[in-house]
Image (cartoon, helix red, strand yellow):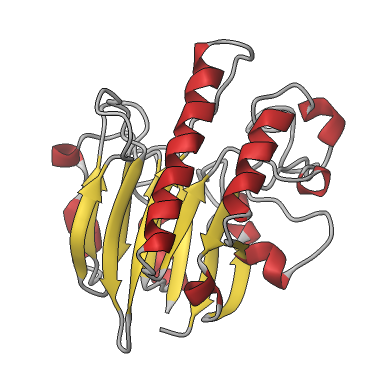
Amino acid sequence: MKIATFNINGIKARSAALPQWLDEAQPDVVLLQEIKSVDEAFPTELFEERGYNVETHGQKSFNGVGILSKFPLEDVTRGLPGDADDEQARYIEATVMGDDQAVRVCGLYLPNGNPVPGPKYEYKLAWMKRLQARAEALLASETPFFMAGDYNIIPQPEDAATPDTWREDALFRMESRTAFRELINLGLTDAFRARTQGPGHYSFWDYQAGAWNRNLGIRIDHFLLCPQTADLLRDCVIDKGVRGGEKPSDHVPVWIDLAL
């Protein structure tokens, strides 16, 4: 099963590019971030006509996550547990029913956290604590799962072309990286690093300052797999070429192949 995560930076802006990529790449499941659309306005028919079941957790003009799946989706939940007052649409879960077994799919758009210090950074760190609690609950239930999406975390210096320029950014501050490491230390596997080592692998390039042409990227889109799911991992690839297409997102898809 080919599963991708893709921060599309607005469904309206990507209404042509996203269907084209789906037709070319043929993923079985896609986790979307930053759809920037309320659920009622999301162009569901674009994806249903391609054989996808569609579930979204939208928000007007900001945030928003979704799941496209060629397999049935069951027990869909919206919102990250732990804060009933959190109105930001950043998290969606569903069970994907594969041919041989099921997996719990957790799609996320983790807060950026800038500027630092300030309430946005405090919200980011609190959100990560809630994410860790959710991962702990899923691990305790022995549910096969993975958590994937735009984490807005640069895990290591090798995950940035120019790490020194990110030292005080919320994406690379030690508190952020420590929270990410605590998540992995629960027993989760960074799928990309399980398959590929070394610098020079990025999933985001800013629109400014010629970042794409100069390859000044960062790796912030991740798949974290529980032990049962990690055992099924065949591959993990960053689909870098998408960034060079027409009207691209500033992110590119990252996908895994699971033996499901």
User: In this rendering, does residue 220 appear at all?
Assistant: no
Residue 126 is situated, as x and y percent measured from the top left of the image, at 48, 28
What residue is drawn where x is 84% and y is 60%?
A: 198
Q: Quadrant of the C terminus?
A: bottom left
The residue under the point 38% across, 59% down is 138
Judging depth in this view, the residue of 38 and 243 nearest the camera is 38
**Residue nearest the viewer, comparing 122 with 113:** 122
Query: Quarter-wise, where is residue 67 in the image?
Result: bottom left
Position of residue 169 relative to residue 217, above or below, is above
For the residue pair 32 and 97, the one nearer the viewer reads as 97
Rendered residue at 21%/66% (across/down) = 73
- Residue 224 percent location from the top left of the image: 54, 59
Is residue 149 shown left or right of residue 73? right
Farthest residue, direction bottom: 100
Residue 29 is situated, as x and y percent measured from the top left of the image, at 36, 67
Residue occupying the far left of the picture: 40
Q: Tag count in the figure?
A: 0
At which x and y percent is residue 117? 63, 12
The residue lying at 48 percent from left, 79 percent from top is 258
Give the left or right position of residue 247, taking residue 209 as reference.
left
The answer to whether residue 6 of the structure is visible from this angle is yes
Q: Is residue 17 left or right of residue 75?
A: right
Q: Is residue 14 above or below residue 174?
A: below
Which image quarter is the N terminus in? bottom left
Of all residues, the one furthest to the front in this rendering is 140
**Relative to 83, does residue 16 appear above or below in the rendering?**
below
